[in-house]
Every structure is written in structure tokens, then in C-alpha cells.
Image (cartoon, helix red, strand yellow):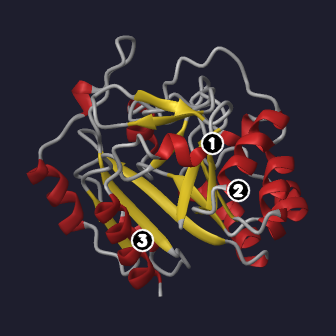
């Protein structure tokens, strides 16, 4: 059974230069269109979990409704967010439908975050203080906590993990920045060598850490237009639309690395135990 990432929109209140979610989406899909996609995944018999992503998913006006809908189908629900828009009021209303919330945090250093674009236009960042403000409410609602960190030229020397000591973090995923160029956006100046990536890994131990240096064809990414993407080339290519085709038909054309996918989730279960 698979987990599928639903990128509800490209828009974001941050402008992180490590982000790959540049889909050239022309419009927001309606809540009914996203429910159709969720139904499509559920009826395939191959999907048992969905992860709502973006852009920033908390900017999508019907995120709560979609979380409730996926939960009603007994799908596991997770969200990946920059954290800046997560509120106690939202958690009080929808937390019972959510298994895990992941926070994209590439640095706890404000200046480094701003240099990477991990901030709003008025330089709002999401650092350790902001995380600790929302942290008690996550524990109160028994939501698992995940942190995603993309290691790149600006943060690979950072001492990051000491900020997590004493916190209940179920999974810290450390990823090497992936080269991206769609003709309009590229991150070539953020790229690092494997030696630099390993330098960060060695300097930042953590018991529930998962290290990944490749994402190629081992993630199910549904873009903001409802398309399953093939991420083997430098720029994402479309496999097919889940608005017009059954998931199983589209999946049959997907260049999927099942072994890498399964190894990731086996590792995760072992580390998160």
C-alpha cells in the first residue's frame, strides 16, 4: 500500500529556494476535484495514506474539509507545512483527522533561513521559537511530529540537531538538495557534493533521523493540476491526470522504483519505533 503526496497548490507565503513545487498550475482545483482524486486513490486499492502538501497547504481554503474527507475513507492523513500558518484553533477542529504533521525546517538560524528564502516577504521565518509555540498543542492532540530538512550550500555546516534534544520528534528526515530547473526557476547555486551532505549528517546525529540522498521515482507526487509526476528528469514530467484516468492506469506508466520506496518506509518504521 502506498502514500501519495497531494500538492494542493503552488502558492506559498514563503519563497524557499530549495522547493521543487513549481508546477505552472493555472488555477486552484476545486474541493470537489480534489475529492474526486482522493476517491480515485482510495478505489485503486493501492493507497492507504495521503499527505497534503503545497506550496503551503494551509493557504488552500478547503484544507480542513479535505482532511476530514480523506479521514472518513479511513486513509491515514498527514500534512507537510512551513509551520507559519498552523494554529491552535485549526488543530482543535481538525486534529482528530490527522496522523502526522511535518514541518519543513531547513535552518534554526534566522539569517540562514532568510538567505535561503525560507521566509515571507516581510522576513517572517519559522524557527525554534515558533516551533515551540505550536509544539504543546501537537502533543495535546497526539499528532506525530516530523521535520524535513533539505541540506544545501547555505546550511550544510549548521549544528541543527541540538535544537531537537528533549523534544518528541517522531521522524527527522534529512535530504540532499535535488537539482531542479524548469526553465523559469533553478537552484543550481544551492547544490552540494555528497561529501558536504555527509558532513552535515555526521555533525547532526539524532535517534529518529532518516537520511535520503535520492528521491527519484520513489515518491508519488500529484501536482496542483491533478497530475501524477515523473521526477526522473531534472524537470518534472507528467505521467497522467487523476482527474480523467484511474490511478491504476496512470500508475502502470509510472517509472516507479518500488525497492527504494519500500526501503524508505522500512527504515522509517525502524527508526520511529
Label 1–label 3 contact, CB within 8 A: no
What is the quadrant of residue 201 in the picture?
bottom left
Q: Residue 56 appears at what percent x and percent y?
A: 64, 38
- Look at the picture and state if 205 lies above or below 108: below
Tell me which label, 3 or 2, sits earlier in the chain. Answer: 2
Marking on residue 43:
2
Residue found 84% across the figure and 36% down from its top: 32
- Look at the picture and state if 125 lies above or below 68: above
Disc 1 from disc 3: Cα separation: 25 Å
The answer to whether one can see residue 209 in this image is yes
Tell me which label, 1 or 3, sits earlier in the chain. Answer: 1
Label 2–label 1 contact, CB within 8 A: yes
Residue found 29% across the figure and 42% down from its top: 177
Marking on residue 246:
1
Quick one: SS at disc 3? helix
Depth order, front residue of 112/55: 55
Quick one: SS at disc 1? loop
Left or right of 32: which side holds 179? left
Using a 10 Å C-alpha cutoff, classify the residue at mark 2 as few (fewer than 14 neighbours), some (14 to 19) or many (20 or more): some
Quick one: SS at disc 2? helix
Left or right of 159: which side holds 248? right
Labels 1, 3: front one: 1
Q: Residue 199 appears at what percent x and percent y?
A: 15, 59
- Look at the picture and state if 226 lies above or below 102: above
Residue that extends furthest to the bottom in the rendered view of this protein: 273
Q: Which residue is mark 3?
A: 265
Disc 3 from disc 2: Cα separation: 22 Å
Amino acid at each position: 500500500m502506498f502514500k501519495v503526496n497531494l500538492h494542493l497548490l503552488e502558492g506559498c507565503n514563503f519563497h524557499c529556494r530549495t522547493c521543487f513545487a513549481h508546477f505552472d498550475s493555472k488555477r486552484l482545483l476545486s474541493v470537489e476535484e480534489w475529492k474526486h482524486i482522493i476517491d480515485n486513490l482510495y478505489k485503486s486499492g493501492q493507497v492507504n495514506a495521503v499527505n497534503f502538501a503545497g506550496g503551503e497547504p494551509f493557504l488552500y481554503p478547503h484544507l480542513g474539509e479535505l482532511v476530514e474527507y480523506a479521514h472518513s475513507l479511513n486513509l491515514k492523513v498527514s500534512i507537510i507545512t512551513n509551520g507559519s500558518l498552523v494554529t491552535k484553533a485549526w488543530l482543535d477542529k481538525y486534529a482528530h483527522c490527522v496522523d502526522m504533521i511535518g514541518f519543513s525546517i531547513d535552518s534554526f538560524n534566522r539569517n540562514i533561513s532568510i538567505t535561503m528564502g525560507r521566509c515571507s516577504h516581510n522576513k517572517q521565518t519559522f524557527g525554534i521559537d515558533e516551533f515551540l509555540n505550536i509544539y504543546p498543542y501537537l502533543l495535546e492532540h497526539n499528532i506525530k511530529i516530523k521535520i524535513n530538512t533539505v541540506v544545501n550550500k547555505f546550511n550544510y555546516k549548521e549544528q541543527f540537531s541540538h535544537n531537537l534534544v528533549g523534544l518528541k520528534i517522531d521522524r527527522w528526515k534529512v535530504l540532499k538538495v535535488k537539482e531542479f530547473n524548469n526553465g523559469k526557476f533553478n537552484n543550481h547555486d544551492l547544490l552540494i557534493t555528497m561529501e558536504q551532505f555527509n558532513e552535515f549528517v555526521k555533525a547532526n546525529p539524532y535517534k529518529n533521523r532518516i537520511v535520503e540522498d535520492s528521491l527519484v521515482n520513489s515518491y508519488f507526487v500529484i501536482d496542483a493540476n491533478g497530475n501524477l509526476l515523473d521526477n526522473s528528469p531534472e524537470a518534472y514530467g507528467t505521467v497522467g491526470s487523476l482527474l480523467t484516468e484511474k490511478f491504476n492506469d496512470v500508475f502502470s506508466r509510472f517509472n516507479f522504483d518500488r525497492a527504494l520506496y519500500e526501503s524508505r518506509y522500512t527504515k522509517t518504521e525502524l527508526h520511529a519505533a
